[in-house]
Amino acid sequence: MVNRWARHPRCVALARAELRKLLARWGLAIVTDDAVLVLSELLTNAVRHAGVSPGREIETRFSKEPRGVRIEVHDAAESWPQPRMPDDCGGRGLAVVAELADCWGTEVRDGGIGKAVWAVVAVPGGGEA
């Protein structure tokens, strides 16, 4: 499933709601809490740090994997996310993603402009979804 969002903080809650509905439909309710938190962190990072013009959209893609769900957040910014030391103002997002996701990474966006940050949240115990 693909959605496009305005680069605005309210898109995070809207995207979480979409992911919850999709996971329920796919029978993946068991990963909902972790998947929604991972999405929140990735999408919030794009909204805050993508550094693209306010009119540019951010895209989310959700796909069912054999063991869970793949979450992708696409933006047009050239800068890639960098883990940083947490402080009072933040810096915990990618650490949270690394803790909750089975795997995650960054790749060049389709068309070569910007990036996609992705994470796979797997069913606990490694079972099939």
Image: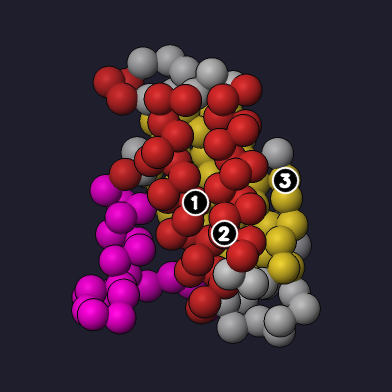
Residue 12: mark in rendering: 2
Q: Residue at x 71, y 61 (%)?
A: 5
- Of the numbered discs 3 and 1, the one sitting upstream in the chain is 3
Residue marked by disc 3: 2
Question: Tag 2's secondary structure?
Answer: helix
Reply above or below: 90 against 74: below
User: Mark 1 and mark 3 in contact (Cβ < 8 Å)?
Assistant: no
Q: Residue type at mark 1: give it.
A: Leu
Q: Residue at x 30, y 73 (%)?
A: 91
Asked whether residue 44 appears in the rendered view, the answer is yes
- Of the numbered discs 3 and 2, the one sitting upstream in the chain is 3
Count every numbered label the image shows and give the total: 3
Image-quadrant location for residue 58: bottom right
Q: Residue type at mark 2: give it.
A: Val
Measure the alpha-carbon separation of dots 2 and 1. Answer: 8 Å
Reply above or below: 70 against 51: above
Image-quadrant location for residue 7: bottom right
